[in-house]
Image (cartoon, rainbow, N blue to C red):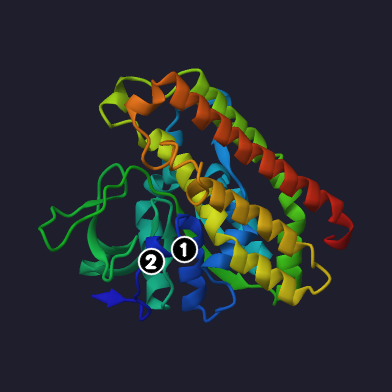
Amino acid sequence: MKIIPHIRPFTSDNAGENYWFNSAMRYVMECLGELDYDYGFFAGLTGDNFTQFYPRNGNFSNNVMIYCAVSDCQMGADYATWVFDQIGYTCEYVARKELLANQAHYLQKIMAHIDRGLPVICSDWGVFVGYEDGGQTLLFLTHEWTEPKRLHVCGDNFVENIPHTENDRGHEFDDCDLIFIGEKKEQKDLATLYREAISRLPAQLTGGTEDFIFGAAAFRAWADDVENGKFDNILMREGDGTWSYTNYVCVLATNGSCCFDFLQKAQELNPDMAFLSEIAALYRKIGDMWHRDKDCLEKLGGGFNISYKTLTNAKKRAKIVAKIREFADVTDEILVLLKMYEGEAP
């Protein structure tokens, strides 16, 4: 067996680490000794911890249900290259089609990285951290696992579960792109990275992709779908469709709870950005509206506790819709503040 020295839980859900790509980047950077680039740094760099998203035109096809952050919505070779470039590194992004066409080559490359003590990021929410049997078995780490699990190198998905026992559960693979860390090109200035991440937020909060919309528009589209009966369907009634709703609750809850360390660090490194305390206050307001206010989303039955019964009650649904639109209004306030101080954050 060959395994990298740095083995730890991939992420901590109880600490609000809900966006897999930031966990993966943090893990790679820890292996390189780049400790300034932690989970919170990447969650701010990508804008994940600041930005609501929602399927464009209410389109839940094309597996959009697996997307949990704006980094998911944008993931691909160009996006991964951009993120690594921000911190002065190169990378190689290998899409599933190319991986399957050249399995032997990329298996050798995975093993070479592991031999150097470097994990390989897998788009199926984790990292490869070791291998056995000359590479025919790969060791995979994700979520809060304290030790990696074994996967066969074979099949249409590049890797498949080893039939698991109670003490050795596999991981269900649907797809698999890979990201290999490359060389370090330059040392980036940390204060500038934080400043530029803040300066990108206005564009992100008003942007989107072909399949998703971001920011206040995402909240309003979500509210429209609730109001128009998008979620009061048979899947929701049977409990199988609740994730299609609570995924977006998770995003707003995470962003209303977990962006503050990044804002504080940005202000410490850039003392002229005093306005960030006002931005933080508005994100705290989002957190209050989610689960602390007397009329918060959770108390209205429109949070993680959503049910078919609530969604089909006209009076209760109207209150939930109004509350989701309030999140959009606060996001508009955040955008106004950011634009007001754009000159201070080039």
* Furthest-right residue in this view: 343
Q: Position of residue 100 (x, y in %)?
A: 37, 46
| Picture residue at 86% right of the left edge, 51% below the top | 340
Q: Check the picture and name the quadrant holding the N terminus.
A: bottom left
Q: Is residue 266 left or right of residue 90?
A: right
The amino acid pointed to by label 2 is Phe
Q: Position of residue 272 (x, y in %)?
A: 84, 71
- Kindly identify the amino acid type of the residue bearing the numbered disc 1: Ser
Name the residue carrying label 1: 23
Q: Is residue 346 left or right of residue 100?
A: right
Residue 87 image offset from top left, x and y in percent: 65, 68
Q: Nearer the viewer, residue 180 or 334?
A: 334
Q: Secondary structure at mark 2?
A: loop
Q: Which residue is located at x 60 percent, y 68 percent?
A: 261
* Quadrant position of residue 283: bottom right
Q: Is residue 220 left or right of residue 301?
A: right
Quarter-wise, where is residue 134 in the image?
bottom left
- Write down the residue under mark 2: 10
